[in-house]
Image (spheres, coloured by chain):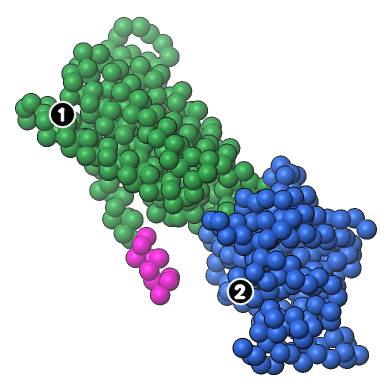
Amino acid sequence: MTALLQLQALTVRRGQCPVVDAVDLTVSAGEFVGLLGPNGAGKTSLLRGALGLLPHEGQSNLSALPPGVRARAAAFLPQGREIAWPVTVADLVALADGGVAAQGRALARMGLEAYRTRRATELSGGEQARVLIARALAQDAPLLLADEPGAGLDPEAQIRTMQVFRDLADEGRAVVASIHDLGLAARHCTRLVLLHQGRKVADGLPRQVLSAENLASVFGVKGYHAETPDGPVFQPLGVIR
Amino acid sequence: MTRAVLPALGALVAALFMASLLIGPAGLGLGQSLAALFRGEGEAVVMVMRDIRLPRAILGLAVGGALGLSGAAMQGFLRNPLAEPGLIGVSSTAALGAVIALQTGAAAAFALALPLAALAGATLSALLILLMAGPRGGALALILAGIALSALAGAGTSLVLNLSPNPFAAAEIVFWMMGSLADRSMSHVWLAAPFIALGCAMLLTTGRSLDALTLGEDAAQSMGVRLSRLRLVIILGTASAIGASVAVAGAIGFVGLIVPHILRPLVGARPSRLLPASALGGAAMVLAADIAVRLIAPDRDLKLGVLTALVGAPFFLHLVWRMRKVEA
């Protein structure tokens, strides 16, 4: 297995306070890793620190690379959904510089082929989010880091996006995505990593990570967990604290 | 349509450049004027063409191109359609340098003292901006530092006006600040052209990075853009092109703001396509305005900067009005 992301004792500070605290993480080709944790757990800082977009201590195999080389090693979908100018969807996806074939595949995967000539700024928020995911896919990198890819998407688009990410992993790439929907994460990810107050508190198969103890101590919720013929089902049920 | 924009603008600029050479109070014939550019020595028509009209047309082309291009680059970099080249304070500090040269009498003693002092002012402001919003500073630091520098240079200019010994000295300064291309010589061209060319060449390299920046700083960096280098190129390129423009033409407002606005929808909004289009569009606007000031009031020395603002500001209001309707 090729390791595409290697973090050793990655620490990101805001002021004196560490928001990511000595996290070790290795992600190999074929994995779709769901990055879980409550608000402020350090998911975004972990992704940005790993890419070298934030000053950090510890090692990341990506952050030391020259920007042009890093762009071929990893694509990034930031949390902020900014589109400054009214460019067409085709032009926006072409920003990724991964080649025309990759752009066509990315548009097809996100169901956006009919949108090519539309102006991205005139689309709805959810459609814009799909266009930006397509842009990240079009970079055609072996690793995709996605910060809350499901935010603002309707249920169908959320499920499709998760399936696309799982397909990428099955094709031999790797995806690390921060996800708030525990049910979707349980169902589609090959592995979950749970962050709490900047530390990695659990790492493993979905049913191991989403244990009753972890849910109570990290999220303060209890949940319903079942194995069905279609795969694992998980539903948060109520607040404990 | 997008592909026809650059050739169409190029043809417009070429036509306006020719018109700028052919229009003036001397009332020369077409063939006679053009022949005098290349042949003959010492005759009056040769002097009019080579020493009066040619530098004026070249400066119109260069200054307009610099204003349009740096406006497009600044808007692309800050991802804000209200940005303009003067935002980082280069125009105001260049103007302050020129005003000091006028006030001290250096400009009267030595013809190039004024543009040289303006260039010195622009250089100083570029260094200060880099110091305050250099490699590590963000867009906000850049804007705030630029506003502070502009305010400081504006206060300096007011102080010079305040202390001017007589009304004529003050009037000279005020008239210079209105911006004009009249009575410029080839030595102005030789002084400004290298800086404008260098600045424009730097800004034209930023197209792909500005394209990526459409999606924000994080996305652009993840696509391989070096933000600190981009910021350096934008600041130095703008300072060089705009500093030299103000040095030879004074303050010509609204071109850098309005030209990218007009052309953005025509080129599909991508900054990399907008940069060359805005350079041509700026050149066309300044050449046209400079022809207009000669035609409207040949005897009154109507100032170029006054006309661009008079035409530009209402047009800008019209754009804001249309934008308001779309957003509502």
Q: Is residue B216 above or below residue A215?
A: above
Q: Which residues are magenta?
A: B319-328
Say which amino acid is labelled 1.
Glu
Q: Is residue B247 above or below residue A182?
A: above
Is residue A143 toward the left or the right of residue B55 in the image?
Answer: right
Q: Which residue is mark 2?
A: A39
Residue plotted at (38% across, 66% down): B322
Q: Quadrant of residue A64?
A: top right
Q: Which residue is mark 1?
A: B172
Q: Where the N terminus of chain B falls, by quadrant? A: bottom right
In the image, B227 versus A65, the foreground residue is A65
Q: Quadrant of residue A13?
A: bottom right
* Residue B321 shown in magenta: yes
The picture places residue B272, in percent across and down from the top left corner, at 57, 46
Instruction: Confirm or deny contact between disc 2 and disc 1 (CB under 8 A).
Output: no
Q: Regarding mark 2 in the picture, which secondary structure is present there?
A: loop
Say which amino acid is labelled 2.
Asn
The picture places residue B114, in percent across and down from the top left corner, at 27, 22
**C-alpha span from label 2 to label 1:** 62 Å
Q: Residues within 10 Å of mark 2 (few under 14, many from 20)?
A: few
In the rendered picture, chain B carries what hue? green
In the image, B320 versus B143, the foreground residue is B143
Q: Residues within 10 Å of mark 1 (few under 14, many from 20)?
A: few
In front: label 2 or label 1: 2
